[in-house]
Amino acid sequence: MSDYLWVRPANLTLPDPDENSVEFWEGLKQGKLLLQVCGVCTQTNYPPMVMCSGCAGFDFEWREAEGGGVLYSYVVTHQPIHPSLVDYTPFLTALIELDEGPRVTSNIINIAPERAKIGMRVKLELFQVNSEITLPLFVHE
Ligand SMILES: [Zn+2]
C-alpha cells in the first residue's frame, strides 16, 4: 500500500516496565494490547496507572483491545529533539483513539508523515524490539 519505510531509531531508550505496567508489557509480548479496566467504576485507564483516574480505585482487570482505532491527532516533528533522532526526521507522533475509547500515543508506521489525516482508520501492529519489549504501533488500514 505504501513505499514508506518506518525505522525505529536504534538508540532511543526503551520502556522500563514497573509493577503497574508489567502485565501490559507481558500482554504485548504475547500479541495482545491489554487495557486496564477499573473494577469499581469500569473506566479504562491508559497508560496503566497505580490508581484509577476516574474514581481513585485500586481494583483493576485487564481486557484485550481489538486493535482498531482512528487517528485523533498528530504532530510532525522536523527538528531532531534528541541526538538519536538526527537521521529520523521528519517523523509522525500519533494520538490514536482506540475503538474502546482510550487514546494511545504511538506511531503510524506505513505512511509518510505528510499523508496523515485526522480520522483515518488505523489498526494495531506490534513491533518486537527485543525479547523483553514489544511496542504497540499502528498501520493505516
Ligand atoms: Zn475507577
Image (cartoon, rainbow, N blue to C red):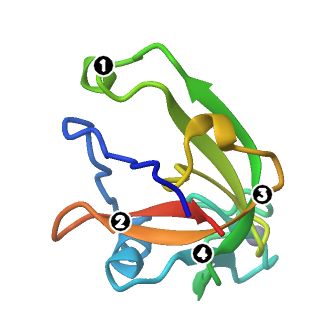
The amino acid type of the residue labelled 4 equals: Leu
Q: Residue at x 81, y 46 (%)?
A: 118
- Return the residue nearer the eye: 119 or 12: 119
First reached walking from the N terminus: tag 3 or tag 1: 1
Residue 40 visible at all: yes
Distance from the alpha carbon under mark 3 to that under mark 1 = 28 Å
Q: Secondary structure at mark 3?
A: loop
Q: Residue at x 79, y 61 (%)?
A: 54
First reached walking from the N terminus: tag 3 or tag 4: 4
Residue to which mark 1 is pinned: 86
Q: Residue at x 46, y 52 (%)?
A: 3
Residue to which mark 4 is pinned: 35
Task: Specify the label residue 127 is tagged with.
Answer: 2
Residue 48 visible at all: no
Q: Position of residue 39 (x, y in %)?
A: 70, 83
Task: Specify the label residue 8 is tagged with.
Answer: none
Q: Position of residue 20 (x, y in %)?
A: 44, 65
Estimate how packed mark 4 is, as few (under 14), some (14 to 19) or many (20 or more) residues with alpha carbons within 10 Å. many
First reached walking from the N terminus: tag 2 or tag 1: 1
Estimate how packed mark 1 is, as few (under 14), some (14 to 19) or many (20 or more) residues with alpha carbons within 10 Å. few
